């Protein structure tokens, strides 16, 4: 046993000759041995004498989780039973039917079938209620259990009984053959304006660089694009090698693209571009936001440092910690942070403080005193401190709290399901006009929402403060007047956030008819970051000026 070995080693250290000096390594080993002995004693006594019956395996799992949680947000242990989740995160592949599901009351229903997958091929639609799998009733089964039943080895079959949304008085039974489902890295690409190509990359799973290459070559050969937007917003990263492959498409071969440095020097490495590029000249804009992390930041950082692209959007997430898989006993796996990412200029991508973030995940303001200056290939100033700061900053656009609640309650999905089921699909030019929105307002008339605006919360805080400071009687009339004006009212909020909700409903309906690609394409019409990127890409002088002269800001 490993524990016995450590304790024996510690005993040997204690038996030193008089006057012998204990080295730093020996002291460390002794401390480890003492701590392990104390932990084992605590575990034994708690397990034997605690008033309630405990599960020893869960106690050990919780202890391991607590230990790793103190290190950083990305070091974690995967037991054998969770390895499929880890593999899916890395490869983007699993055996199943290719559909998102969601819990609605006692039942689970289809939320979104993926295009070309078994779920879509047998005719499943959003809103269809899943009743039985191979004769097993799914009432109150829960989404986790239903998900595990839908998944399985490719080419295995099962029988599904479901109730279609379009005819709730009937049921249908279909036989489905599970397939290897591959979540595409590039859900959409196309030409959006003035010969500007657009590629959205959602993940860095195996093969995503080939998807980017194929999309780019098709845009050049079939559409003769003159510039390119690579959208990495919300892309949380993945396989580093895929990011290096994408960088290699647009910069000369054998250029330094990334450095990894950690405590173990033998694990340090330098990544260089791997092959001859496919285009060294086309103007490129890379879109990032606070959700762009890891491999997304490797691309943005390298393209910025090498002055090969302008970066547009918000400061990226700042996830520059490198994880390496370590095999554990009983087929488990430890994903362990072993180093940090550094861009070609020498900037560390990792946020200086990754434990304190804003609600949107961003690192917020960083004191100038701890930010260091670096230079790009052309001599422009860029800075570290957390993530990649864009060349062109665009204010982030957030969904309102009211809109988030409607989504969380499932009301927008419910309306989109019904509307898409009973209306003729039209992809080109479809809009949620006032007539359709009025239908949504009618749909919401009997729905209850536990909603309290931020203004209402702050007003309550002001009332409490006024009461403590004896001002409440003097300003009660003013406070009541404010309360009346900002009163949380569902119908008022539906009108207040009408434009925002119309666009969101629009994309949900388009997804039901034409899958996610239609919604992505539609959302670009009013996207500020995309519009700004187009403006610069179609202005050669401004594009070149930015790459030659413009420094980034520190915050």
Image: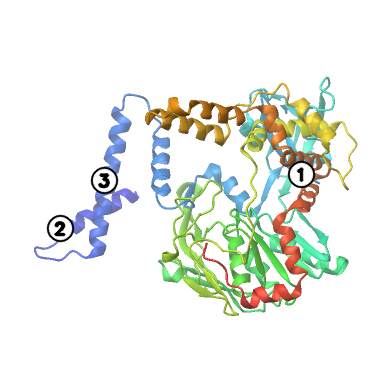
Which badge, 3 or 1, is on the more N-terminal residue? 3
Q: In terms of depth relative to the viewer, which is nearer, 227 or 63?
A: 227
Which badge, 2 or 3, is on the more N-terminal residue? 2
Q: Which residue is mark 3?
A: 37
Task: Please give the label number shown on residue 205.
Answer: none
Q: Residue at x 47, y 29 (%)?
A: 475
Q: Residue at x 54, y 74 (%)?
A: 381
Kindly report the distance in space between the C-alpha atoms of the residues bearing marks 2 and 3. Answer: 18 Å
Mark 3 secondary-structure assignment: helix
In the image: residue 208, left or right of residue 469? right
Kindly report the distance in space between the C-alpha atoms of the residues bearing marks 2 and 1. Answer: 66 Å
Q: Which residue is mark 1?
A: 114
Q: Residue at x 42, y 31 (%)?
A: 466
Q: In terms of depth relative to the viewer, which is nearer, 118 or 281?
A: 281
Q: In terms of depth relative to the viewer, which is nearer, 414 or 212?
A: 414
Farthest-out residue, front: 474
**Count of number-bearing discs:** 3
Of badges 2 and 1, the one in the foreground is 1
Task: Please give the label number shown on residue 15.
Answer: 2
Q: Residues within 10 Å of mark 3 (few under 14, many from 20)?
A: some
Of badges 2 and 3, the one in the foreground is 3
Mark 2 secondary-structure assignment: loop
Above or below: residue 178 compared with residue 246: above
Farthest-out residue, top: 169
Locate residue 543: give its quadrant.
bottom right
Kindly report the distance in space between the C-alpha atoms of the residues bearing marks 3 and 1. Answer: 52 Å
Q: Residues within 10 Å of mark 1 (few under 14, many from 20)?
A: many
Asked if disc 2 and disc 3 are in contact, CB closer than 8 Å, the reply is: no
Mark 1 secondary-structure assignment: loop
Above or below: residue 429 compared with residue 546: above
């Amino acid at each position: 046993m490993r524990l016995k070995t450590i304790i024996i080693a510690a005993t040997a250290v204690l038996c030193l000759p008089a006057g012998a000096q204990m080295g730093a390594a020996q002291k460390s080993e002794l401390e480890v041995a003492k701590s392990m002995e104390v932990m084992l004693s605590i575990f034994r006594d708690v397990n034997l004498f605690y008033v309630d019956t405990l599960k020893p395996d869960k106690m050990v799992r919780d202890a391991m989780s607590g230990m790793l949680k103190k290190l950083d947000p990305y070091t974690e242990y995967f037991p054998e039973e969770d390895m499929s989740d880890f593999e899916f995160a890395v490869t983007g592949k699993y055996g199943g039917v290719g559909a998102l599901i969601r819990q609605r009351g006692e039942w689970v229903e289809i939320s979104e079938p993926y295009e070309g997958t078994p779920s879509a091929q047998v005719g499943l639609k959003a809103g269809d209620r899943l009743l039985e799998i191979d004769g097993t009733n799914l009432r109150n089964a829960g989404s986790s259990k239903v998900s595990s039943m839908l998944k399985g080895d490719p080419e295995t079959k099962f029988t599904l009984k479901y109730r279609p949304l379009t005819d709730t008085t009937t049921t249908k039974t279909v036989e489905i053959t599970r397939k290897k489902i591959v979540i595409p890295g590039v859900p959409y690409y196309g030409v959006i304006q003035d010969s500007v190509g657009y590629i959205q990359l959602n993940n860095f799973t195996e093969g995503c660089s080939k998807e980017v290459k194929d999309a780019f070559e098709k845009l050049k050969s079939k559409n003769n694009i003159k510039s390119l937007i690579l959208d990495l917003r919300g892309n949380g990263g993945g396989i580093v090698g895929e990011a290096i492959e994408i960088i290699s498409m647009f910069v000369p071969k054998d250029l330094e693209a990334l450095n990894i440095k950690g405590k173990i020097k033998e694990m340090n490495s330098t990544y260089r571009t791997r092959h001859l590029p496919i285009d060294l000249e086309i103007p490129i804009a890379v879109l990032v936001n606070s959700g762009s992390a890891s491999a997304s930041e490797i691309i943005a950082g390298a393209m910025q440092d090498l002055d090969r692209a302008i970066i547009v959007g918000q400061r990226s997430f700042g996830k520059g910690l490198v994880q390496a898989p370590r095999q554990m006993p009983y087929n488990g796996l430890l994903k362990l942070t072993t180093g940090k990412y550094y861009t070609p200029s020498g900037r560390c991508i990792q946020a200086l403080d990754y434990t304190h973030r804003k609600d949107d995940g961003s690192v917020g303001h960083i004191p100038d005193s701890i930010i260091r200056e670096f230079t790009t290939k052309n001599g422009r100033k860029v800075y570290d401190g957390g993530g990649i700061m864009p060349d062109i900053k665009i204010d982030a656009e957030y969904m309102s709290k009211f809109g988030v609640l409607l989504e969380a309650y499932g009301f927008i999905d419910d309306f989109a399901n019904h509307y898409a089921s009973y209306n003729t699909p039209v992809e080109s030019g479809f809009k949620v006009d006032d007539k359709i929105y009025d239908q949504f307002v009618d749909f919401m008339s009997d729905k209850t929402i536990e909603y309290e605006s931020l203004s209402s919360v702050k007003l309550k805080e002001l009332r409490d403060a006024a009461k403590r400071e004896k001002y409440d009687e003097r300003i009660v009339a003013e406070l009541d007047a404010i309360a009346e004006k900002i009163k949380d009212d569902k119908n008022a909020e539906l009108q207040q956030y009408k434009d925002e909700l119309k666009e969101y409903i629009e994309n949900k309906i388009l997804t039901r008819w034409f899958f996610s690609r239609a919604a992505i394409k539609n959302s670009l019409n009013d996207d500020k970051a995309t519009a700004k990127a187009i403006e610069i890409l179609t202005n050669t002088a401004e594009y070149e000026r930015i790459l030659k002269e413009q420094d980034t800001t520190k915050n």
